Amino acid sequence: MKRRLWILVLVSILTSCNLTALEPTATPHSTPMPASPTTAFSTPTLIPIETLLAIDTPTRVPTPTSSLILAAPRDQPVNCRFGPEISYAIVGALISGRQAEVIGKNADATWWYVKNPSDPSTNCWLSADFVVVTGNVESLPVVGPPEIGVTNIRVRVDPVAMNVGCNAFPQTFTVIGQITANGPTIVTWRWEASNGYVSPEEMLLFELAGDKEVRGVVSVSGANDYWVNLHVLIPNDRSGGANFKATCTP
């Protein structure tokens, strides 16, 4: 009886041990951690379109080119005239060591139309014989001469009539002329009379538009009706005259 009891106790102990060994070890469940807050998306920085264009577009460097046509004196100062002839007034000068920008030429390229080196707000003409020009002169436009000249001539005689003894000749008459020009120019003129008298040519400078007076003397050798002309030859051909009379008493 005791033996059976020990066997039961032994079986009970062994069974208890086996159950303990066979019981699976429970895997501890990890406590779920609260999710970390998601970092907010940052707002992208906007880049100006001008910056993108500057990055993507290669910089174009302009090639320096000069289209200026320049005139310089050959060896001495050169007069700059109002028109392309020596009959036109001098309105400026191109001195040694200086240059003038050429902006035109006359029909046969014997004169250059330039910005006045003495007054860049105006233009004038340089003779091609006395300057050296650099640049593409073929591209220059042809510029006509200024329409400047004598617009009016008035003449009077003092006295307009004369009566002397027939043996008192020759007698002289004073002739007075007034020349009107519409701009700066040089006028070449002379007196001409019906008795065949022709005076030497003289020159008159007009620095500006206006009137200038000239005087002369005409000598007559007898009683007659006469005329006298003031003849302008340059810059344009024009005449103006007056009549006068000489009588005599025997």
Image (spheres, helix red, strand yellow):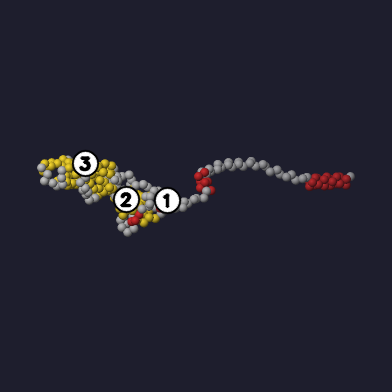
| Kind of residue at disc 3 | Ala
Q: Distance between the residues labelled 3 and 2?
A: 31 Å
**Residue 158 location in percent, x, y?**
16, 42
Q: Do the residues labelled 3 and 2 touch (CB within 8 Å)?
A: no
Q: Name the residue under label 2.
A: 85
Determine the residue positioned at 21% across, 43% down: 227
Quadrant of the rendered image containing residue 225 = top left
- Residue 205 shows in the view: no
The residue at the far right in this view is: 1
Identify the residue position indicated by label 1 in the image. Answer: 139
Where residue 207 sits: x, y (%)? Answer: 26, 47
Circle 3 sits in a helix, a strand or a loop, which is it?
strand
Separation of marks 1 and 2 at Cα, in angstroms? 22 Å
Query: In this orientation, which residue lies closer to the viewer: 202 or 49?
Result: 202
- Comparing 28 with 97, the one in front is 97
Q: Which of 57 and 146 is in front in this view?
A: 146
Quadrant in the picture for the N terminus: top right
Q: Are marks 3 and 1 in contact (CB under 8 Å)?
A: no
Secondary structure under tag 1 reads helix
In the image, is 250 to the left or to the right of 154? left
| Disc number lying in front (3 or 2) | 3
Amino acid on which the number 2 mark rests in the picture: Glu
For disc 3, the marked residue is 242
